[in-house]
Amino acid sequence: MPKTLLHRYTSSPRAFPVLASLYPPLLGSGIRIRHVAPDWTRGELDMHVAPWTANTNGTAFGGALFAATDVLYGALLSGQLGTGFQVWTKSATIDFRTPGRGRLRCVVEVPRVEADSIREQLTARPRTSIVHTALVTDAHGGTVVEARHTMSIRRRD
């Protein structure tokens, strides 16, 4: 059972995109979560590069690009695993491929089999780590950013 009203609504794949998009760091960065699959296996977000979200070169600010790669995987995995598990970003690296301009997009998928495998691993040990890659693409499908996140997952006691 979710601890607070906020936990309750962020544990819903219908409410999560709206509430997370209103989270000040995402809202201020022009990041909008557009869709989360009902089974938490896929999420999509857009990032609009505007004057207030751009760097001094007029392209996407690197911190905002990092935030775009960070938000979905943990949320999708948490949604599938449930409230008995805690998912954290342990470390990450980001490779800026091309300057981001206009509307950018990030799509993340967490297959059910991946979440099931993690759940199984956590029956034998208290914590596990996995690495996933997230891409931010431009309107033409070109890769703007590739980020590799190491996630730490553990059972809540």
Image (cartoon, helix red, strand yellow):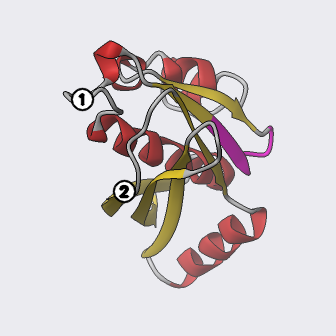
Q: Is residue 83 magenta?
A: no
Whole-percent x and y of residue 32?
A: 54, 24
Identify the magenta region. 38-44
Whole-percent x and y of residue 76?
A: 62, 48
Depth check: give the residue in front, 49 or 37: 49
Q: Which residue is mark 2?
A: 89
Label 1 SS: loop
Q: Quadrant of the C terminus?
A: bottom left
Whether residue 141 is visible, yes or no, is yes
**Dots 1, 2 in contact, CB < 8 A:** no
Q: Is residue 43 magenta?
A: yes
Q: Which residue appears at 51% of the width and 66% of the height?
A: 132
> In this rendering, which labeled residue sits more in front, label 1 or label 2?
1
Label 2 SS: strand
For the residue carrying disc 1, how many other residues have a C-alpha within 10 Å: few (<14), some (14-19), or many (20+)? Answer: some
Q: Which residue appears at 42% of the width and 59% of the height?
A: 147
Please identify the residue farthest to the bottom as the structure is shown.
124
Whole-percent x and y of residue 134?
A: 52, 57
Residue 107 appears left or right of 58: right
Q: Which residue is mark 1?
A: 55
Q: Is residue 137 above or below residue 153?
A: above
Q: Which residue appears at 46% of the width and 47% of the height?
A: 69
Q: Which residue appears at 42% of the width and 38% of the height?
A: 100
Within the image, what quadrant is residue 30 found in?
top left
C-alpha span from label 1 to label 2:
25 Å
Whole-percent x and y of residue 95?
A: 35, 61
Q: Amino acid at mark 1?
A: Asn
For the residue carrying disc 2, how many other residues have a C-alpha within 10 Å: few (<14), some (14-19), or many (20+)? Answer: some
User: Which of the marked residues, 1 or 2, is nearer the chain's N terminus?
Assistant: 1
Q: Amino acid at mark 2?
A: Thr
